[in-house]
Structures are given as structure tokens and as C-alpha cells.
């Protein structure tokens, strides 16, 4: 994996192999190139109440910190306190209420010193050493070996910092950095409003930390050194903020020969010495070498534009479901006239071009990649962890889940942050386009009148307090992530623009100068994106819906937020709800209200109304959670199918609110905080598949959605119904075909299904088969009886399901499910990979399918992948609606 420098650029630790390659390519260039490493362990911290000395003294290695607490860096004050067991886990039960809130304690309570000792020898003459911070919340002063590095207090959660520390390095190689970190200037009153009283938005920082309708307040407001700290070593010249642009003309296909693409590369070169330095800025990509000789004046930084490269027969990057995600490795170097590599980057380049156009039929914006229109099936993303405990592995797992849902876009919501490079690396890998909001929300920033807010709309409309800091931070963050091919859209804010002066600067100056190849929209539900003829905010609905809502009721033609429920299963609930609080929600149909336990309320439970009761009154919480998965699957399959059924007619895309939670919330999630998927994920996996057969429950129409660039011909469409005992009725079997990027309607089965389902309900199985009778798409619906209930499911006979498992290559297991005999369907089977010793699920694990239904006489295979290849004593559990619980040994 390529590491990222704090300047936002990939860095490559020099190796013998790479040095040999440099010799071959660049003809005996001496490999004294840049190296970078993280300062990510061995930190200590202490509250300012216990530290009376100044930074100059604290930052000397002879100053004792033996009484200080171990610190988590990257991390926050609260993550350090939790890790040291001085505060409880805020994700469990009501523990968060035991943690003092900064609004009541005052800012000094969470103002902390952080120190780190590290070894680094003095560089050779002319070489440079930099200390880099990729994010500190909210303001700080920084000291090294007795010297203060910043001239004035550094402020702003997102603004990167870089200090040339060469002259302050200790001669004996023993160095200490000391940082005093102050909380946000305005901590906000967490009064239950969206963003509390709104004043959290006066900072250039995260807004959700004062609480929202899906999260409780973070008590320290994420104060700390929350992002990476690195030491970077270069020669005299340092490469800063390289910029790679790829231009792909005309309409392309994923396969076959390609016309050339244009690659444009530029970078800033910083000369930190007192003499001019001459050399070459050069890069290699796919065997091509582009270079330019330059001279950089003393103590200066100069922008350098290299000549364009015409890349022959390029391998293109495509969104998930449309083609491969090819990434080229570009090596960018500055080589001095003495043939020494002063600095170098390795950048992953995805060759693609993004364009947009107004779709006159839908009256919304249409996104094109490499000249091809892409129907957006998206998700809203908050943040990976509310306490900012980020990792490459967690980012990879979460983005992979979105890939496995067959989605193609993630919107990063504006009340959080501009996501980290490691998130974008995962999106590049899995083909997820990114819709990146800038900081701000309609809730905090004054779009609506709100009695929970401290200040009036006109005042809130001017937030944040420091507009110059906001713009400077945006400029910095654009440079940080603009090279990632997955980044598709810049957005001024969530449901509101930034203040007019900021918006004008971003639109007219910052984006044209720094990143002019992407779509910039002023706010997330702007009419520049989607015409709003229905009133309201231009997004929604939210909460549980009859499936007819998604199919038959037209909403906004590019909907940035539409969502439903998302309670996970019983195993997930046990991770954060104490046993005494496992209390069944009580829904009153007469009033439409639900009585819920206090812990459920605290974790933002959103009600299922009477949808659970349609499967029979839940007996206990476990029964409730199991039945909730049926509702979850149906909701999210129906949501995406309903939008896909009107693709390019009503809609150019939709984005689900939301697919993940950064803590243990009980709404809007396809997997829980612990990376355990629920049925929402697999309902989406089905409803979003690139070639998908589906059934409109309102009209009975059978349709095929083709979200690929290929025509599919000579297919067989098969529709069969099953009763609760497994008796099969063939409804139709016809040849079919479908053209690229379209939805085709075939025939209605409503009359037949209404008749078959009248008394007990029924199952409908739709299949698309190729000429070899291989299944291209299968979709199994459970249809309610004439009263809208699933009465037959409650008395369904036991199914005959045999299950075996065997290991494949490293980290994979194949499970075979066979429904033997002439009995009923083996309905809705949840598979879980478990550690036999601990009886716990292996998390994360990735299933090719789950909540699987197997027809009579049918066999299905599910592939499970897991990351921890060291785990040996594993098995698979199976829990099915009418098959009971099974433990499946993995046969060696």
C-alpha cells in the first residue's frame, strides 16, 4: 500500500529493488530520495491543569513526563482517556452520559499537552527534514527541542501544517516535539438540536460533535492531534502538491482498443536552501518518460508545468459495475544536476474524465464518465468513526461494503469532514465515485428557523466566524485529494451554500485554479442538480415507507437523500445494549406512536411502525430483530428498484440516507459500527445489481434494469410462484433482451400473484438465464396475503436445507446450500463466519450473498472472505426462517 505524506502526496520508502529500477530508467541516478515515516506511537499527554511549565521547557528531552498518560495519536483527548480507562466506552449503553461535556466543564478541561520523543540524525549538508501535521483540532502551538515552530497560534481543524525543522534538530539525534492543543473556540450547547445550539458551526470544523438526530454529542468535540504526524526527509528541493489531470475525449467502452488519453502533470518545487538549485522534474508512467529542466531560486517555491503526455491505448478507470478500476503507478521525481534524487512521489493515476449535462427529460443533472452516462446509485456517508479512530483497514472494509451493495457513489456529508486520502484510495480501488461536501449544513448555518439555535438565521448565515481561514482550508484540502480519480463532485455544503463571499471565491477563483475538471455545485439539493417542483427541501422521504412510495410516487429527479430504517440483528444489538434494556418496542397502531426503552432512544432508534407486526407480533427482542431484517431487505431492495424502474425517465440518480454510522446508532445503516452487515446491505446488493430482474408490487410489472454498457440478448425470462409448502406454478417463460443503460418492461403478473397470494401469501421467483441456462439474475419476493400480512410465513413448514463448507485459498470459505427433497423454500438464511473458540462472528467478513433463499431442488454457493488469515478454528453458522440454527464445520 502506498503511504501518504502529510502534504497529501503518496510517498515511497526507498528500497533496493526500486533503487535498481531507478538506475535502469534514469541512468545511474543516485538514490538519496525522500523518505517519510509516521510518529504514531509513544506519545504522552497531560491536561494543562497539571502542567505549569512552558512549551520551550516541556519540549526538551530532559524534561520529565514520567507521570503523563499514554496518548493516542492520531486521535483525540477522549480516545486517549478511553484507551487509558479513565473514561468509559461511550458506544455502550448510556456510558456517554458519564463523560463530562465541554460545554459544562469549560475548554480548559479538554486542553492538553502532547509530547513525543523520536530519534532522527542531523541531515547531510543541503538535505532537509520536515515535521508535518495533517490535522489538529482546533488550535495549537508546536515546540521542538526548546524552540517554538509556529509564529502565531495555528487554528482550523483541517488546515495542514509543515515545518522545516532542519536547523532545530538535536545533534545527538534525540528529539522531542511538544504540542498544546486547544478545543474549538465555540464548543456549542448540546441542547438536542441538529448540531446543538448551532454555534459549533462558528468554527472551521466538524458540526456533528454537538449532537444530531443520529448521534449523541462527542464530549470533547474531537479535540486533539486527530490526523497523521510525519517526519519527511528530502534533498534541497521538495515536491509539493503535485497535480495530475487526465483527459479522455469521446465516448469510450470499457473493453477493446482505446484512442489516446492526455495526461497533464504539474507540481510546486520548494527550495529550502540559500542557493539556486538546477535539475529535472520528471515522471514515468506506463513506460513513458516526461521531464523538464528547471532552476529554482534560493528560499522560494515555484509552480512547474510539465509537457502533456499522449498515453496510447490507455486502460481506463470506471465506476463500480461499469468496468475495471485500472490504476497506473506514476513515479514523480526531482533529480539535481549532480544526479541525486532530491524528492520523489509515487502516485496512483486513474485515467478517466468526468463531465455533466442537463437531462431535459428528468430535469436533473446527469453524470458521464469517459463519455458514458452513469445512473447514480449512491449512499450518504458521515465518517468512519465519531472519535476519529481511522485506519486503512477500516476504510477499505467500509468502502468494500459499498462496492458489495452494487452502489457506485458515496456522498461525504457536509457536517463532517473532507475525507482522508486513505478513504479515497479505497474508493479508487473499489470504483466508488465521491460526492464531497464542503463544511456546513442547513441546520447549523441558518437555512431554517430553529428554536433550538442560539442565534438568528441572519447571524448563522454568516458562520463560520473566520471566512479567510475557511477559504485557506478549502484550498489546502483540494490540493490534498484532487489526484484521486474517484473524486467526482465538489459541493458547497449540506442543504445550504457557504456565505456568499465564500461561495463566490470558491466558484470563481479556488476551483477554476486548483481543480477545474470536476463538477462544483453550490449545495447538496441545489436546483442546479435537481429541479424541485414538489416543494420541501429537495430531498427525502426519510423513515420506513410502503414499497409503493419508491415505485409509484415521483420524488426529486436527482435525490441527494432518501432513506429508511436499519436496526441490525440480535447479535449486533447485544454489543451495545445492556441485557436489562433489551426491551421490545411497543407500537400503538391507534396513535401511530411507539414506546421504546431509554437506551434505544439514546441510540436514536427509528420506528418500524406496524411493519414488524405484518410478520406476526414479535415475542421478544431477538424475534423483533430477526423480523426487522425481512423489513430491511424489502425496504432497500424496493428503494433501489423503484428508482431504477424510472431510470432516465424520472431520475438520473438517487443517494440513500444513509448507509453507515460512526457509532452504535440504530438507524440508517447497512452494517453496524463493528462492521457486521445486516439485511439492508443484501437487499441493496440485490436491488442494485448491474443486470437485474425485478417486480413492481403496485402494478405487477416485470422489468429488467441494465446498468451496463452492453446489450444482453437471447436471455430467457422465467417467472415462477411457490406456495408455503413449496408447490411450484410456472407463470411465464419467454425470451428477452435489453439494450444498454435502460430499464425494459415486459409483462404484468399482478392478477396471477394476487390470486396465488390471497389466503396465505406466496413467493415469486424471477430469473434471467443465458443460453447455457446459467442464472444471470435471480430475485425472490415474498408477497403478502389479501390483508397485507405475511400470514403464511408464520406457519411455514420446516425446510430441508443441507449445508457444507470448505476452505478455498487464503482467507476464503465456500458454503454450499442445497434444498433437498420436495419441501418448501429454505427461506431467508443468514450465514455468519464465527470463531469456534470465542463463539463470536469474524468481523469484518464479506459474503458474496446473504439472507439467502434456496428454492426446492436448488443449490447455491456463497463465498465468504475474511481479512485475518491467522484465524484457524473457524466455522459457519446458519440461521434461517424455517431451517433453524446450524453449525457448519469447514471441511479441510
Image: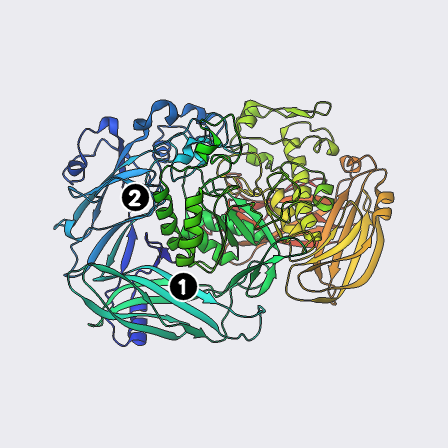
The residue that label 2 is drawn on is 41
Q: Is residue 39 above or below residue 69?
A: below
Q: Residue 142 appears at what percent x and percent y? A: 23, 41
Whether residue 373 is visible: yes
Under circle 1, the secondary element is strand
Q: Please state, as top left, top right, bottom left or bottom right, where the N terminus lies in the image.
A: bottom left
Q: Residue 759 appears at what percent x and percent y? A: 85, 37
Q: Are marks 1 and 2 in contact (CB under 8 Å)?
A: no
Q: Which is nearer the eye, 628 or 244?
A: 244
Residue drawn at x 33%, y 66% is 332
Taking the view exactly as shown, the residue that stands out farthest to the left is 171
Q: Is residue 474 above or below residue 297?
A: above
How is the model colour-coded? Answer: rainbow
The residue that label 1 is drawn on is 244
Judged left or right of residue 6, residue 502 is right
Q: Dot 2: within a 10 Å radius of its alpha carbon, few (fewer than 14), some, or many (20 or more) residues?
A: some
Circle nearer the viewer, 1 or 2? 1
Q: Dot 1: within a 10 Å radius of its alpha carbon, few (fewer than 14), some, or many (20 or more) residues?
A: many
Q: Residue 171 appears at what percent x and percent y? A: 12, 51
The number of discs equals 2
Residue drawn at x 56%, y 26% is 601
Q: Is residue 732 above or below residue 882?
A: below
Judged left or right of residue 719, residue 815 is left
Q: Residue 385 appears at what percent x and percent y? A: 45, 40
Q: Earlier in the sequence, mark 1 or mark 2?
A: 2
Q: Please state, as top left, top right, bottom left or bottom right, where the C terminus lies in the image.
A: bottom right
Residue 11 appears in which quarter of the rendering? bottom left
Amino acid at each position: 500500500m502506498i503511504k501518504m505524506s502529510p502534504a497529501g502526496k503518496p510517498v515511497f520508502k526507498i528500497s533496493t529493488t526500486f533503487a535498481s529500477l531507478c538506475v535502469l530508467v534514469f541512468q545511474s541516478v543516485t538514490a538519496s530520495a525522500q523518505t517519510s515515516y509516521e510518529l504514531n506511537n509513544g506519545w504522552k499527554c497531560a491536561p494543562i491543569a497539571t502542567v505549569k511549565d512552558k512549551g520551550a521547557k516541556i519540549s526538551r528531552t530532559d524534561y520529565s513526563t514520567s507521570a503523563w498518560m499514554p496518548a493516542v495519536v492520531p486521535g483525540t483527548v477522549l480516545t486517549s482517556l478511553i484507551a487509558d480507562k479513565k473514561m468509559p466506552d461511550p458506544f455502550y449503553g448510556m456510558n456517554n452520559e458519564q463523560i463530562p461535556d465541554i460545554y459544562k466543564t469549560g475548554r480548559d478541561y479538554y486542553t492538553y499537552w502532547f509530547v513525543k520523543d523520536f530519534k532522527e540524525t542531523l541531515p547531510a549538508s543541503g538535505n532537509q527534514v520536515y515535521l508535518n501535521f495533517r490535522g489538529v483540532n482546533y488550535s495549537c502551538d508546536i515546540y521542538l527541542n526548546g524552540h517554538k515552530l509556529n509564529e502565531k497560534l495555528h487554528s482550523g481543524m483541517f488546515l495542514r501544517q509543515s515545518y522545516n525543522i532542519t536547523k532545530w534538530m538535536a545533534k545527538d539525534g534525540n528529539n522531542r516535539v511538544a504540542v498544546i492543543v486547544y478545543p474549538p473556540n465555540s464548543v456549542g450547547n448540546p441542547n438536542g438540536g441538529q448540531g446543538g445550539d448551532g454555534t459549533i458551526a462558528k468554527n472551521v470544523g466538524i458540526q456533528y460533535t454537538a449532537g444530531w438526530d443520529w448521534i449523541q454529542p462527542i464530549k470533547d468535540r474531537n479535540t486533539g492531534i486527530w490526523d497523521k504526524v510525519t517526519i519527511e526527509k528530502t534533498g534541497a528541493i521538495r515536491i509539493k502538491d503535485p497535480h495530475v489531470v487526465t483527459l479522455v475525449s469521446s465516448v469510450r467502452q470499457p473493453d477493446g482498443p482505446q484512442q489516446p488519453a492526455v495526461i497533464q502533470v504539474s507540481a510546486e518545487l520548494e527550495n529550502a536552501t540559500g542557493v539556486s538549485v538546477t535539475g529535472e522534474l520528471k515522471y514515468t508512467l506506463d513506460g513513458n518518460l516526461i521531464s523538464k529542466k528547471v532552476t529554482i531560486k534560493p528560499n522560494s517555491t515555484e509552480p512547474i508545468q510539465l509537457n502533456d503526455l499522449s498515453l496510447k491505448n490507455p486502460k481506463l478507470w470506471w465506476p463500480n459495475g461499469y468496468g475495471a478500476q485500472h490504476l497506473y503507478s506514476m513515479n514523480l521525481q526531482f533529480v539535481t544536476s549532480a544526479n541525486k534524487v532530491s524528492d520523489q512521489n509515487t502516485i496512483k493515476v486513474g485515467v478517466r474524465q468526468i463531465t455533466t449535462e442537463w437531462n431535459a427529460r428528468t430535469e436533473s443533472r446527469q453524470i458521464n464518465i469517459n463519455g458514458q452516462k452513469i445512473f447514480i446509485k449512491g449512499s450518504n456517508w458521515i465518517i468512519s468513526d465519531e472519535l476519529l479512530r481511522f485506519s486503512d483497514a477500516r476504510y477499505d472494509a467500509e468502502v468494500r461494503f459499498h462496492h458489495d451493495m452494487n452502489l457506485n457513489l458515496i456522498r461525504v456529508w457536509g457536517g463532517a469532514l473532507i475525507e482522508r486520502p486513505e478513504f479515497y484510495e479505497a474508493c479508487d480501488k473499489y470504483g466508488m465515485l465521491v460526492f464531497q461536501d464542503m463544511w456546513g449544513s442547513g441546520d447549523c448555518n441558518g437555512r431554517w428557523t430553529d428554536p433550538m439555535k442560539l442565534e438568528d438565521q441572519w447571524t448563522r448565515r454568516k458562520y463560520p466566524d473566520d471566512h479567510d481561514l475557511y477559504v485557506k482550508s478549502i484550498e489546502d484540502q483540494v490540493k490534498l485529494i484532487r489526484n484521486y480519480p474517484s473524486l467526482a463532485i465538489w459541493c458547497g455544503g449540506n442543504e445550504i451554500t457557504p456565505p456568499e463571499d465564500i461561495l463566490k471565491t470558491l466558484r470563481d477563483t479556488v476551483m477554476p485554479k486548483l481543480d477545474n475538471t470536476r463538477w462544483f455545485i453550490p449545495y447538496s439539493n441545489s436546483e442546479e442538480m435537481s429541479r424541485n417542483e414538489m416543494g420541501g427541501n429537495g430531498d427525502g422521504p426519510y423513515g420506513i415507507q410502503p414499497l409503493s412510495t419508491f415505485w409509484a410516487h415521483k420524488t426529486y429527479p436527482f435525490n441527494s437523500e432518501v432513506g429508511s430504517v436499519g436496526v441490525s440483528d440480535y447479535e449486533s444489538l447485544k454489543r451495545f445494549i445492556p441485557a436489562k434494556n433489551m426491551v421490545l418496542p411497543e407500537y400503538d397502531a391507534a396513535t401511530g406512536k411507539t414506546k421504546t426503552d431509554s437506551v434505544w432512544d439514546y441510540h436514536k432508534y427509528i420506528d418500524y411502525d406496524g411493519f414488524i407486526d405484518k410478520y406476526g407480533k414479535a415475542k421478544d427482542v431477538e424475534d423483533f430483530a430477526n423480523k426487522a431484517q425481512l423489513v430491511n431487505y424489502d425496504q432497500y431492495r424496493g428503494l433501489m428498484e423503484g428508482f431504477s424502474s424510472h431510470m432516465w425517465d424520472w431520475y438520473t440518480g438517487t443517494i440513500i440516507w444513509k448507509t453507515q454510522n460512526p457509532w452504535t446508532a440504530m438507524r440508517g445503516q447497512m452494517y453496524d459500527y463493528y462492521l457486521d452487515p445486516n439485511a439492508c446491505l443484501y437487499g441493496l446488493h440485490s436491488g442494485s445489481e448491474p443486470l437485474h430482474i425485478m417486480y413492481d408490487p403496485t402494478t405487477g410489472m416485470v422489468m429488467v434494469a441494465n446498468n451496463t454498457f452492453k446489450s444482453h440478448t437471447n436471455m430467457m425470462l422465467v417467472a415462477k410462484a411457490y406456495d408455503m409448502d413449496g408447490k411450484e406454478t410456472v407463470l411465464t417463460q419467454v425470451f428477452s433482451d435489453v439494450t444498454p443503460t435502460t430499464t425494459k418492461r415486459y409483462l404484468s403478473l399482478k392478477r396471477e400473484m394476487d390470486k396465488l397470494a390471497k389466503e396465505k401469501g406466496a413467493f415469486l421467483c424471477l430469473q434471467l438465464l443465458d443460453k447455457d441456462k446459467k442464472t444471470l439474475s435471480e430475485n425472490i419476493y415474498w408477497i403478502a396475503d389479501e390483508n397485507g400480512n405475511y400470514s403464511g410465513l408464520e406457519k411455514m413448514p420446516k425446510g430441508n436445507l443441507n449445508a457444507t463448507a470448505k476452505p478455498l485459498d487464503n482467507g476464503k470459505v465456500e458454503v454450499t446450500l442445497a434444498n433437498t427433497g420436495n419441501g418448501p423454500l429454505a427461506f431467508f438464511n443468514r450465514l455468519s463466519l464465527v470463531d469456534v473458540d470465542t463463539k463470536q462472528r469474524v468481523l469484518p467478513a464479506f459474503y458474496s450473498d446473504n439472507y439467502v433463499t434456496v428454492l426446492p431442488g436448488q443449490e447455491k454457493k456463497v463465498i465468504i472472505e475474511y481479512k485475518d488469515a491467522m484465524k484457524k478454528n473457524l466455522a459457519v453458522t446458519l440461521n434461517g426462517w424455517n431451517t433453524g440454527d446450524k453449525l457448519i464445520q469447514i471441511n479441510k
